[in-house]
Image (cartoon, grey):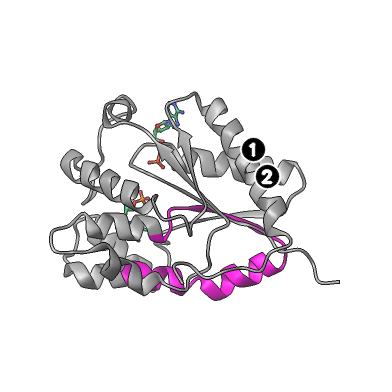
Amino acid sequence: MACKRGALIVLEGVDRAGKTTQCKKLFEALQRSGKPAEMMRFPDRTTTIGKLISAYLENKSDLEDHTVHLLFSANRWEMVPLMKKKLEQGTTLVVDRYAFSGVAFTSAKPGFCLDWCKSPDVGLPQPDLVMFLQLSPSEAALRGQFGEERYEKSDFQRAVQNKFQQLMKDRSVHWQVIDASQSVEDVHKDIMTHSLNAINCAQNQALAELWK
Ligand code: ADP
Ligand code: 2DT
């Protein structure tokens, strides 16, 4: 009998919402409970495309806005064969940002509509669960200053948050809003509950295609 597939679990949210902290905790908890899991993050700055993106984010290079949007998408597509292989082998993937960040960040720039921004990512593996770590700008500010990277400005982050709210109206995606203002442990408990459900459901379902 073919082995049961792993789940594709994505964490999204604004800067300092706790995505990286929670991806790591979820990954470690799944491993401890004997469920095969791996962590991924986008952008993946290690590939040739990822290095172009990283230089752009660090303000070491400038790229035209459409161009960088397509590079972010290409950086996901280049990982799709590996992602599918892992999922089919039964490994659950815990992913720090995905196409939703891609759309929210570019569509927060002037002159970009949601539909254009979504189009290059149409057909990517559909996440079984997307958890949005919700945190107000004032609570995020208590967690430290913005860094030096290109998008780390409060006005832009507010615009990004609004775009995420628009994306969350789409019922074809399994969104789950998580109250990220709780303690690290309480956020983890919520995330674990939703993830275990998603892993159970994914076992018996074929992997679908995003926004198709
Ligand atoms: P993100 O990946 O969303 O930008 P991080 O996981 O890097 O966020 O966390 C940003 C900062 O906030 C880190 O210093 C982290 O230790 C802290 N942090 C994360 N989760 C919480 C929480 N629930 N309560 C308080 N501080 C947190
Ligand atoms: P971190 O590496 O700190 O998460 O920051 N972004 C991300 C986009 O503009 N488009 C995308 O497709 C993705 C995945 C969000 C990465 C920065 O890049 C932005 C913050």
Q: Which residue is mark 1?
A: 193
Q: What's the amino acid at mark 2?
A: Leu
Q: Which residue is mark 2?
A: 196
Q: Report the front residue among 118 and 151.
A: 118
Q: At 52% across and 70% down in the image, what residue appears?
A: 209
Q: Report the front residue among 123 and 46.
A: 123
| Image coords of residue 9 (percent x, y) | 56, 53
Instruction: Report if the CB atoms under discs 2 and 1 are less than 8 Å apart.
Output: yes
Q: Residues within 10 Å of mark 2 (few under 14, many from 20)?
A: some
| Residue 49 visible in the displayed image | no
What secondary structure is found at the residue carrying circle 2? helix
Q: What's the amino acid at mark 1?
A: Thr
Q: At 43% across and 53% down in the image, what residue appears?
A: 97
| Image coords of residue 186 (percent x, y) | 56, 26
| Image coords of residue 212 (percent x, y) | 46, 72
Left or right side of 110 for 180: right
Left or right side of 152 for 178: right
> Which portion, as a residue range, is magenta?
71-99
Say above or below: 103 vs 158: below
Check residue 8 in the rendering and tell me which mark sits there, or answer none.
none
Say above or below: 86 vs 194: below
Q: At 52% across and 72% down in the image, what residue appears?
A: 80
The residues bearing labels 2 and 1 have C-alpha atoms spaced at a distance of: 5 Å
Left or right side of 46 for 34: right
Say above or below: 22 vs 84: above
Of all residues, the one furthest to the right in this rendering is 1
**Ligand 1 rendered quadrant:** top left
What secondary structure is found at the residue carrying circle 1? helix
